[in-house]
Amino acid sequence: MPDLRFGDAGPTDEERIAVDDVVADLGAVLVVEGERLVYAGRARTAERRHLLLPALHAIQRASGWISPGGLDYACRQLEVPPAEAYGVATFYHLFTHEVPTATDVVHVCDDVACRPVGALDLIDELRAAGHHVKASPCLGQCERGPAVLVQRTGGHDLTIAPGSVDGVAVAISGRTSSASVTLHQAGSPGLRLLARVGVVDPGSLDDYRANGGYRALDAALAMGPDRVIEEVTTAGLSGRGGAAFPTGAKWRGVADQQGRPRHLVCNADESEPGTFKDRVVMEGDPFSLVEAMTIAGIAIGAEQGWLYLRGEYPVAAHRLRSAIEQARVAGLLGDDVAGSGKRFDIDLRVGAGAYICGEETALFNSIEGFRGEPRNKPPFPTTHGLFGQPTAINNVETLVNVLPIMVDGGEAYRATGTERSPGTRLFCLSGRVANPGIYEHEFGITLRGVLEAAGGVIGADEPHAVLLGGAAGFFVRSGQLDLPLTLEDTRAAGVSLGSGVVMVFGEEDDMVDTVRRVAEFFRDESCGQCVPCRVGTIRQEEVLVRLRDGATLDAERDLLDDLAAVMGDASICGLGQMASGAVRSALDLGLLEGSR
Amino acid sequence: MNDIPVSTPRRLVELTIDGGTVRVPEGSTILDACRQEGIDTPTLCWAENLTPVNVCRVCVVEVENSRVLVPSCSRAAEDGMVVATDSEKVRTSRKMVYELLASSVDLDRADAEVHAWMDHYGADPSRMGDRGDIATVAQRPKVQDDLYVRDYERCILCYKCVEACGEDAQHTFAIAAAGRGFDAHISTEFDVTLPDSACVYCGNCIGVCPTGALVFKTEHDMREEGSWDEEAQSVTTTVCTFCGVGCNLELHVQEEQIVKVTSPTDHSVTNGHLCIKGRFGWQHAQS
Ligand SMILES: Cc1cc2nc3c(=O)[nH]c(=O)nc-3n(C[C@H](O)[C@H](O)[C@H](O)COP(=O)(O)O)c2cc1C
Ligand code: SF4
Ligand code: SF4
Ligand code: FES
Ligand code: FES
């Protein structure tokens, strides 16, 4: 490192102690300083910089903002140039840069699922009650909106869903979040991924074991890494994070690398509007993810696992931290996993409000202490992932699928679902359905079947429109109700399952406003790195505002077409590439015409 | 030393660009290959003395079997690649990148080639809406000392200044990208003034800025009063005498006054980068 110049502002005592704790508590993390890797112009010394994000969290929690003194202190401890650290801090929604006016910041979701159920009124009411309120993108509680996250200074954050003025007051005084959701399918024999949710005590390793926990790890250790990867390949498991990449092939790719160390990363950033499936699994059955990560890590030859959790999930963070700790104490993580002689441990890293950090390479940058800007691919994570080292990254739902594959074998897994989409899938039902919530179905079920299982559409036989796959997905209408929700059928229909979002809208919902909110989401969440997305998303939003205010579609269609083209073809990452999909589908289905 | 490393000649890779066969040394980018063939390609964030950040996307080309367009400035040429540099897709994206930038940023002092390319692709930023009605980065210039002006309403966020200040040349890290999305901007920590930042006034950021967002105060003042006249300037090359490193200086002279100092990017010592003495020492000599 060159001689860095720091500022003059000193930290408060709380800030200094908070940052010192982060630096001292390196925990079980194994970071080997690799060769100087020049990546997009930035040389990376891994040694300490990866503590920047945790340090920023510590400062924010201690002081209610990222103060100049606190940031400067962290920069000195971690040898990070202050301008760069400021650039990182200003990247995240949950960090603030002005002197705080209140101890608690009340984030209220005003995103697509929460708007129709009173989010905007709730924002007004909470403001009138004297709270410092910020409107937020989807908080991952869409089945019980409007959702609220209370970000506290000097204490733990709280989730309140559905939110109300009274509910927020009660939660703050009692320092407790809302209870986790009920599972409508509880007790159903078809459940594999959700079988333990609501049944097992999420805080108890013993109870997890009593309910079949850690049988999969035993089986995997008996098989050895190669067989484990073979079974996952035979099972035909594909990624549930959006891109549906074959998991076995991904693991094989990393296992075959010569480079060391290798990493296993679990993507628990879950910020796609309408998505809450990973949260339900992590809150209801946290040990299952710890066990699945252990199996995956050992299979690919990684000694370090990283669990990157979105910052808006305080309950999941608490339960996962406890589960990791208990597993460590029981010898199921650490230097000798379950007596196998293999080392594997997990570090929990918490995001700070940035949808883009769910993109795999942005996630790596975020962990490494850089801005969550996606990297250009190639090279791919298999060879140049976290810290530039070979990395397998998987979604939460993808990983927990490995447990039944280990216990029952790949062939048995493959026998469920369809030929090209084996297994089950989690669906996130929200909006105008009788029983919103999370559902597990075998692949092959139609959209109609999914809606019926959730009690059907409220007040109508058929939905007015369904947002399928999230904001990065597409709208569909009643003509597509018999579409089987498999990878192959959705692909053929030009739509996608994305993260399993099925958000239902009725005649009473304002679709022009909904589509405009989707456009606002992408504008707000663009990392700002590349021109097509940074400027394209704001221009797209401006078009939708003009449409809302009475402009005619004919006047805007050419511009929308060209914006879709440049964002789709020339953006660096999936955010920009998908930013026009839902808008275009709404246009094609005539959802934007009825309004004016 | 007797074990001088002998570099083995680099293997050639063969690819097709716009129907013609091209052979370039392994490790070359598609852009290198295009240049070798005399295919003119626009760039904004690429510079030969900086590591590619591939963020502006104006250099994109179509590569067969790739779902999306690829940035030619950073993608390595591979055997068997089939590249199209002037397809409908490529033209639309390049034109749109210019329209998006020109609708949000003031480009009137950008390099002449920017305007030539905009004409070439028929870019018409006005179709994004009236300037007053759409989002732009309009703001007042930052004038915080006698040497630099930072006029960020001309900034296209090409990251060149950040690279020149940091890893690629100066290792000072005084400026970095801050904020996110359309609010992303180049900033010091907490937007402190340059004199309060780590800045050492090497001027390397100014040297690489393609749009006139970063300029010497002399140039800014002369432009504001209308006396800046590039036509009337002559450039003399000399070697800097402040220390023994031997940096090449290019003195830009207008009416017998030095108005700015640059260094050639292909110079083996500087790669185009200088320090405060070479860049601004003349101000003391002259006054
Ligand atoms: C903008 C953007 C956001 C994403 N967010 C998530 C996310 O929150 N969770 C996730 O698992 N994958 C997300 N992905 C997909 C990941 O990049 C990656 O494909 C995935 O984590 C791979 O895991 P899988 O193979 O198990 O699906 C996102 C992708 C993009 C482009
Ligand atoms: S597409 Fe958007 S989010 Fe992705 S790198 Fe470009 S600006 Fe960032
Ligand atoms: S100030 Fe100039 S060099 Fe820096 S990012 Fe902006 S346009 Fe590029
Ligand atoms: S929590 Fe409000 S839309 Fe998801
Ligand atoms: S010049 Fe290639 S992306 Fe900017």
Image (spheres, coloured by chain):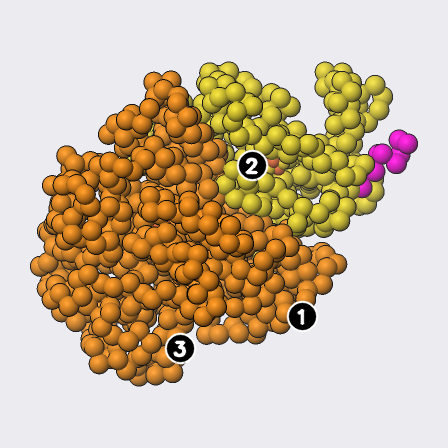
Chain colours: A orange, B yellow
Report whether B175 appears left or right of A202.
Answer: right
Identify which residue is drawn at 40% across, 66% down.
A177
Q: Which residue is mark 3?
A: A325
| Horizontal and vertical percent position of residue B251 | 77, 28
Q: Which residue is mark 2?
A: B158
Q: Nearer the viewer, mark 1 or mark 2?
A: 1
Q: Nearer the viewer, residue A348 or A588?
A: A588
Q: For the magenta stretch, what is the residue range?
A: B277-287
Q: Are marks 1 and 2 on the same chain?
A: no
* Label 2 packing within 10 angstroms: few (<14), some (14-19), many (20+): many
User: Is-magenta flag for residue A65?
Assistant: no
Whichever of callouts 3 and 1 sits on the residue coming sooner in the sequence is: 1
Identify which residue is drawn at 68% across, 60% down.
A69
User: Is-magenta flag for residue B281?
Assistant: yes
Observer able to see residue A116: yes
Identify which residue is drawn at 76% across, 18% down.
B226
Q: Which residue is mark 1?
A: A13
**Image quadrant in which you'd find residue A95:** bottom right
Quarter of the image with the N terminus of chain B is bottom right
Residue type (three-letter) at the residue carrying disc 1: Asp
Q: Main secondary structure of the magenta part?
A: helix
**Image quadrant in which you'd find residue B216:** top right
Residue type (three-letter) at the residue carrying disc 3: Glu
Which chain is home to disc 3? A
Residue type (three-letter) at the residue carrying disc 2: Cys
- Give SS at disc 3: helix
Which chain is home to disc 2? B
Q: Are marks 3 and 1 on the same chain?
A: yes
| Horizontal and vertical percent position of residue A46 | 53, 62
